[in-house]
Amino acid sequence: LGDPQNLKCVTHNLHKMLCTWDVSPRRRHGQTDFCYTTNDLTPQVCLKTKERRVEIPIPESSITVTIKSSGTAFATKEFVIHQKDISFVPVTPHILSLMPDFPTSTLNLKWSDNGSVFPYGLDALWQIQILRKEAMEVVTQVTYYSKLTHEDIILSWNWTSDMPLECTSHYVKIRCYINATQFVGPKDWSDWSPAEVIPGKDAEPGGSGVFPLDPVVAVGSDLTFCCVHEEDQRITNMTYGSKSYTMMQLSSRSHAIRVLNASVSNTSGTNVVCRLEHGLEGSVVFVGYAPDVPQNLSCETPDFLIIKCTWKPGRPSGLYGERRTKYSLFERTSGKNVSCEVSEVNKEHVCGFPVLPDQKTYDFILGVSNPIGQAQSSLLVDITQRVHPRTPEKLIVTGSNSTSIQLHWFINGSFAETRLLCQIEISSSNSERKLHNVSIPWWKSSTYTAQLNALHPDTKYRLRVRCSAADHFWRWSDWSRGVEQTTSEA
Amino acid sequence: MAAADSPSAALRRRDLCSRGIRLAGKMRADVVDLLDAYVEQQGLDASASVAAVEGVPLAAVERWDEQTGTQRLLENLAAYRAFRALLAQMLEEQREQLGEADAGLGRALAAVLLQVSAFAYHLEELLRLESRGIPGEEGDGPPPPPRLSLFEQKLRGLGVLRELAQWAVRSGRDLRQLAKPSPANGAAPGLAESP
């Protein structure tokens, strides 16, 4: 009776172990001699202690321990501890930081792996628990793997909640297990770390509102909205759009609803309304689509001053105003970037980019983005092969006789180095329509002239003109306005 | 006591009052239409109770019949100046939030804003007629309201339009009161004298 009992040794770092034992209550306050010897005939080592715990090196194989506790009469007990009897329990991990990112409902956890304590690289498993609500219910438990490398490494892990972090307090705990394969004794998980908490709005005095506040989400998303209210306020119902939803209670000041597979919202967004006994709280959610990859991106120049790019946007995003889809045109060679003013309502998507001095080839990237996503299209183009002249203007007759008419017209643009091919359509009442092609060499000014011969005397002709690039034909301009001229009599 | 009215001044006031009454009536009809469109477009519940919105003048007044004519005009003028600022802000928020997506509502809002501005000018005319000083606008308008969430913006818009509709009714009544001939000499009461 009264002898030391239940000697147990635990190691936290694989090179020292902590041995503890029990003694009868009568002997608890006396001095104890703790002597141990390994079996390779090294001299016995003795330690005096008033506690019932001693830290000593881990033996290569086994050790013999003699515990002599003083008191009214000496009680001595001898134990043999083999390596397989020593259990390995890592030190309880310490959370360095737990940071919330409210807009994305994401928690970032940082902790030290305490790797410097271990003699050689080991595999470590970390169990991370996320808890919620006042009752601290486990929301999820995740296992994270890492490799210990003799240094203290700060590990980082992100978790995105299915509900806004404002809705209720979130708690995080972590514990670790080290797979020391060479260690023969039993191995166990460390204790859980103390829980770190990110308080919700329902823990904040005066905190209230519907969360998330005014989010933009993709069609098809499953959404959780919560209503945080004062303790003394009773919540009547929560609606999403015109539909009322069953509420889940998160805490005494927070209730939530779950909306599945959200459909596209109308232009002013879908209201999430929380009706309270004395008041109303709400949020507006915008449900839309990420932008499609722009199709049929095409760029041309009407005048060698501006490059006009057009494209098909694909499915409308359903987002408007400051959340609308925005476009920008980036040119890789020059590094120049232009943001495009695109009307949400009218169907034509066009963007202008300046023609740059001494640059014929343009490597365009059309970037498209809205709060839900982004996309891009690219196009490599030589603009000298993409000339689409403007409509010829100020078509006038500058000379005429019985068999010929001289025409004069103007095209806005600087086609100085471009040969133009123009087509003059000649129609009169007594002959069918004819097309007269005329090739016009490089021309400093923007005015052009052509002579039509072999016409019939005393005949009223209707004339109009269109032009294109002669080399590398791309597209005709639109037809000019028509002009009428009657040849003189023979 | 205000200077006795000359017949032309009384005639001018009665004309201004009757035109003001018509403008108030038109404004009220347009505001009610706008309110319906606003409720639908913003996805609101037409019966939603909206707490008093900061900066929105309340149309309800105690002892309405004891107000002097000048008080009526001054209170009306202050109210419509406030509504001018509030509607201008709603228009700005509308463009910000919806861009061109719902131009119809934007146009209706702009039309009502024009009417409110015209009515404020009309009230100033009436005050000038009575050689009443026109109160200056407060600095450069009311202090910018706190940044509201989108739902709070929607509710505030609802509150503004509801109260404006009430004011249009009250203004009509106020102007009818002003247009009444004075019991003493059959002329419209001097603004300071009206009961």
Image (cartoon, coloured by chain):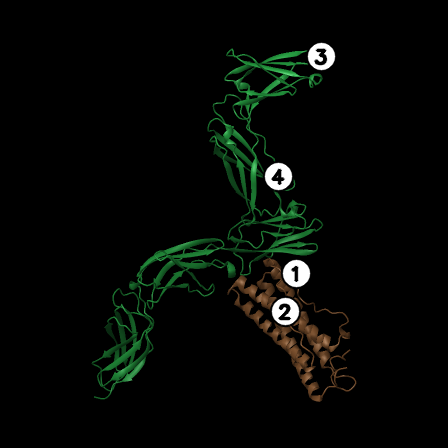
Secondary structure found at label 2: loop
Residue A429 spot, x, y in % from top left = 28, 82
Q: What residue type is labelled 2?
A: Gly
The residue that mark 4 highlights is A137
Give the colour chain A carries in the figure: green
Q: Work out how far the residue at label 1 is from the one at label 2, CA to CA, in angstroms.
A: 34 Å
Pointer 4 and pointer 1 on the same chain: no
Q: In this view, does B125 lie above or below A82?
A: below
Mark 1 vs mark 2: which is more N-terminal?
Answer: 1
Q: Residue at x 26, y 70 (%)?
A: A420
Tell me the chain of label 2.
Answer: B
Q: In this view, does B159 lie above or below A458?
A: above
The residue that mark 2 highlights is B139
The residue that mark 1 highlights is B48
The residue that mark 3 highlights is A72
| Circle 1 Cα neighbour tier, 10 Å, few/some/many (<14 / 14–19 / ≥20) | some
The mark closer to the camera, 3 or 1, is 3
Q: What residue type is labelled 3?
A: Thr
Residue A194 spot, x, y in % from top left = 61, 35
Q: Which of A35 and A448 is in front in this view?
A: A35
